[in-house]
Image (cartoon, rainbow, N blue to C red):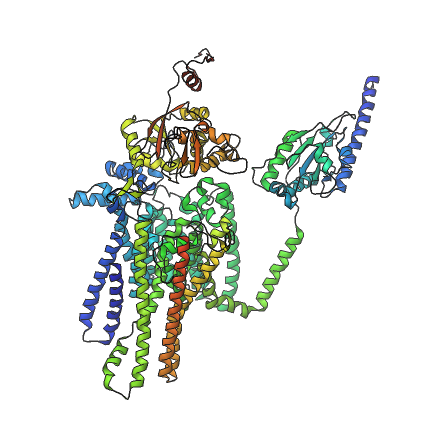
Amino acid sequence: MKLSSKNIVLFIFALFACLSECASNKKLLKETKRGFRNVIKLTDSNFKSILKPARDSYVVVFLTATQEDIGCTLCQAMEPEYYTLAESWFKTHPDGLNDPKETGEKGLFFARADYSEAGNSQVFQHFKAAQVPLMYVFGPSDDPTGDINTFQQLNIPASTPAGDQRIEVLINSFVHHFGLKNYAIYKPVDYVSKAITASAFFLVVFLFKKFNNFVSKIVKSRILWAVISTAFIIIMCNGYMFNKIRNSPYAGNGKNGVEYFQGGMQNQFAIETQIVTFLYASLGLAVLFLVKLVPYLNQYYLKQQKQYNAATSSLLLTVILLAAVFFFSSALMFVFRIKYPGYPFKFLK
Amino acid sequence: MSVETKSTAAQSAVAASTTKNNGSYKKILATVSLFLKLLIFICLIGAATTSRLFSVIRYESIIHEFDPWFNYRATRYLVANGFHKFLNWFDDRTWYPLGRVTGGTLYPGLMTSSGFVWYFMNHILKIQIDIRNVCVLFAPAFSGITAIFMYLFTKNCYNDDSVAGFLSAAFIAIAPGYISRSVAGSYDNEAIAITLLMSTFYLWIKAMRTGSIAWACSAALSYFYMVSAWGGYVFITNLVPLHVFILLLMGRYSSKIYSAYSVWYCIGTLASMQIPFVGFLPIRSNDHMASLGVFGLLQFFMFGDYIKSKISSANFKIFLKTSVVALISIGVLGVFSLTYFGLIAPWTGRFYSLWDTDYAKIHIPIIASVSEHQPTAWPSFFFDTQFLIWLFPCGVFLLFMELQDEHVFIIVYSVLCSYFAGVMVRLMLTLTPIICACAAIALSNVFKYNLKIWRSIKFVIKNRKDNRKSNNRFTELCTLIGKLITVLTFLGYLILFVQHCTWVTSNAYSSPSVVLQSGNHNEDGSPIFIDDFREAYSWLRYNTAEDSKVAAWWDYGYQIGGMADRTTLVDNNTWNNTHIAIVGKAMASEESISYEIFKEHDVDYVLIIFGGLLGYSGDDINKFLWMVRISEGIWPEEINEPSFFTPDGQYRVDSAASETMKNCLMYKMSYHDYPGIFGNPNESTDRVRGATIEAKHVPDLKYFEEVFTSENWLVRIYKLKDEDSQGRDLADVYDLEHSAGKKVVMKKPKLEPRIE
């Protein structure tokens, strides 16, 4: 095989280029390994050296602010997603390089700056970041004298549903724009939680086995089921789901202290559910006692041949229960009149 | 009338209890009791029907709201064209230009029932009656029948206690929760569906108790009727299997349950598949899988029962264990793989929104936009059932004390349905019957004990002169007083309940919403009616070409179709989200874009509802955000919800409104010429939103012209201007015409050579 001098020169040049590029990739990889979960952490001191050309890889920079008092909900939502992005990439490409055989040493690295961390305000100044989150990409560049001002902004799919769907969208756009291969979402298996679930499961099974009688007594306890289902019904009939779906506030802040009731049929505070649940439960209980306890009491004394006691005690109990029903139902109507001022019926007040 | 009903119910209970004691009067008393029962039924039906007639008396015999207008239109079509044409009906006057396969996408039960009544009246009894009156009075008539089925249901469910039966029938007859969907003129599927719900449940209980195939068949037939009438039949499809399943869990398998359920399931499912709209859903949709699964499980139980009688108990245990594991794994695998291969349809969106309450909010704005699908706040429960709501849990608890097979049904029904009713306002309707039943059970228990007073009364009266037994007399008197005050106070609550129901029905549930009643009165005290809707629809009917297309938000589609008889783009049958989004986009876009969209869809007129003058809060500006949201779901890059808000996130219509808001078609149409009607030519107040509208903030309409505005400005109709004869842009033409004197340079339209 003949080698012309031209070819040799070219080959040497390529070798040099390769070496220098390798150096840049290696440096990025080193930074990546130093960072948390395969993401390079940008600070005032290192961001210039990391983002400075020349490099043969893409570097995605993510500017965010997860601090609670900044109140950027999107930043907080995207925090785990960005890490998943990086981990998915490094799962299939441990060196961060795309496909060394075909496209050479082109790779992809992830960097991130969280405004809440001290000492990276220069990073944000450099990018003139007026709002967060922002995503930039630094493309490959051969020019070692270039500055760090050549980059492109990436569109953040804010309206896409959070979680896997958004990661999917981002991955697709990366694959499309950077020509990546073998990049798919990867979720690390959380062995700890699985182990906990499994052991808890076995523990429960074991306990069931051990206290077989007790458990079956509980499961078959009619009173328990009765109490649970009636409680469930009462709570459901009091707008519990409304509070749940609408996230209604617990109580209101009125002019004269705490407001317990919100006017209007279509809104309510969470505390209203509790108050009305109490009212319904007391009313239901009073009627239940009236139906069951009064005859029982009567029979109990009659069996002991105490007619006098039977009569007076059942009369007394009846009167007390009826008074309770009367009182609570008028309270209910009173409460309802707050919600619906035009309601014409009332007992007391 | 209902008070009387209830006291007669109590009397009949007394009559029934005394029957046993007085053997000689047995026959007479039985006759009297029968007579009283009949009287009670007549009273009940009377009460149920008359209390629903407020709207007819106050307004006139008119169809209410939105959906009933479609049902009415479909019924008219049925009556005019016959049943077969009705089933094959393709409606090209809605969802233009798509059309709708109406015959295959509706539940025909309601229309065929009223069509049958009409036919029976006109052709067999020869009583001439208009189909409209049949439709208007259909719901009240059926609620009378509901009361009878309610009686049968409660009586059968609760130890043949006829007092509970009568009480529950009286409750359901006047409970506002049911009246809300069945006043005269509310010609909707629910009107008939609740009747069928109760009849199916009654027949199911009967079948389950007797194990008779005849009862099970009738339950299946009733189920078929229900399927033909209302999409909510899925509730039965799931509740009955759940009942059976829980009975099996409790170890109460019996051959009665087996025969009842098997017959009901087979015949019911086969019959339900005859409805075109249902088709193969019962074997493909996951909503119906529970009933199939329980059917299979029952076969297994039957087989196990048979094996058990043949082999030793030790062998049977092994047999049981292996087969349970095998069956469960096969079942789970089967459902998953069938769903995976697409053989089973996924759960429907409405079903999802019941379980995962955030689902609708995120995925299906069109479901979330319907007010019927909102969660229920507690006042609604009280408003709809008054004191029944606190008797309800007490009744459920009492059922737990006895817990027979049929009691389990009521318990399952109440637990399940109270959750559903909490999630969706509209399911209040299915909860109401069971509230009535449980409350009646609780109350009947109160009365049962406390009405056993004959002995005490006799004792107190007879022994008046007997001093030795004064002690006894005192105790009897005490008992008597205790029982009497209990009965009397509860009678008081009953009377209050009747008053509450009447008040609620008259005030809240009897307005047709097509005609509104103004808060003011004429000089002679008669109420002022606001009849803008019908005014506008009849304007459309008499002043526009018969084939003209009207674009409006989907809420008004059925009414335009029913009252104006014009072709609409979208209507309340929200089957095509994209098509609805098109209208939403047109309303939310700039005029030129809207014009283009509307022209593409051959629209001639655009109709909007504007409540600013009247203070009518259900108008299009208030619904506008839904239009934006729904269209944003399809064209996120063109429509952007935040751009309709002020920078600080408020939804405003006055001078602070965002530019996008001011320039969208809906805003322009709503406030076109509005500033200036109160005297001040430059501004006027929007009474719904309490905002001041200034003339300089309302841009001119360039592509549309106003053709009609109703008396109170409630309905405004605009016509799309014809395209310019010289091919110029309409906005340029408008500018040219309105800048007389000023010189305007017109761009000449680019003419492209025609190549054909």
Depth check: give the residue in front, B639 or A324: A324
Q: Which quadrant holds the C terminus of chain B?
A: top left
Front one among B272 and B99:
B99
Q: Residue at x 46, y 27 (%)?
A: B590
User: Residue B194 location, x and y as percent?
Assistant: 33, 52
Q: Residue at x 72, y 41 (%)?
A: A38
Q: Quadrant of the N terminus of chain B?
A: bottom left
- In this view, B475 is above or below A149: below
Report whether A139 appears left or right of B597.
right
Q: Is residue B465 above or below residue A115?
A: below
* Extreme-top residue of the structure: B753
Residue A247 higher or lower than A308, as above or below: above
- In the displayed image of the protein, which residue is found farthest to the left? B126
Give the residue displayed 64% in from the left and 45% down from the top. A69
Q: Position of residue A195 (x, y in %)?
A: 65, 55
| Residue B531 placement (x, y as % from top left) | 29, 37
Relative vertical location of residue B103 with respect to residue B199 in this rendering, above or below? above
Q: Can residue B86 be seen from the camera position used here?
A: yes
In the rendered image, the residue lying farthest to the right is A5
Q: Position of residue A25 (x, y in %)?
A: 77, 33
Q: Quadrant of residue B97?
A: top left
